Image: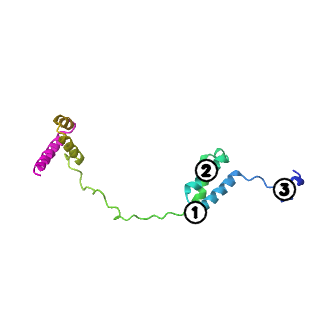
Amino acid sequence: MTAASLPRHVANPGQIARRPDPVEVFSARCEARAYLWAEAEIADLHDAVDQLQHDALRDGLVGKLGQDGVQALIGRAFAAVRQPCVAVEPARDVVPDLLPVPDEAPKRGLVPKATLDAAKYVARQNDPERLRRWLNGRSANARAAIQKHLKGTRCSAQTR
């Protein structure tokens, strides 16, 4: 390269700097985007990171550094500007316990309400064979409890 072929602003050929390292440029871009995100110039973290990922793919850095290397550069830049999280102790009375914790194990032989409701539904179909088939899949204790429940239901239904 001769002095005549140099751009006007470069008077001395020794002033021409080497081409910047793409990793250094990308790292600087990561820091800049992280700063913009921290200052709310870029509203969404995903937008900030996705653009950097796109640029890394375009510039061949994923092939050069690997995906983990690219993510490490992005992560370091954003970790530097991240605001520390403040741990807040949740108020215990804001969300009530939906189900009380039992003091003892449930008693054996009790049939779940859903099973009793299902038995009532099958019994209302007026199909004794269907009810018999449905009951055959239950234990003897469960069948006895269901039968007792259904008898109590009929009595209370007849008195209404």
SS class of the residue under badge 3?
loop
As for residue 50 lying within the magenta part, the answer is no
N-terminal of the two: label 3 or label 1? Answer: 3
Specify the segment rendered in magenta.
136-160
Q: Single out the mark in the foreground, 3 or 1.
A: 3
Q: Which amino acid type is shown beneath numbered disc 3?
A: Pro
Residue at 10% x, 51% y is 159
Tell me how many marks there are.
3
Which percent across, then down, holds residue 106?
A: 23, 50
Q: Is residue 61 left or right of residue 18?
A: left
Label of residue 53 in the image: 2
Dot placed on the residue nearer the N-terminal end, 2 or 3 = 3
Dot 2 amino acid type: Gln
* Viewer-side residue, 128 vs 85: 128
| Mark 3 → mark 1, Cα distance in angstroms | 39 Å
What residue would you read off at disc 3?
A: 7
Determine crowd level at label 3: few under 14, some 14-19, many 20+ residues with C-alpha closer than 10 A. Answer: few
> In this picture, is 7 found above or below 59?
below
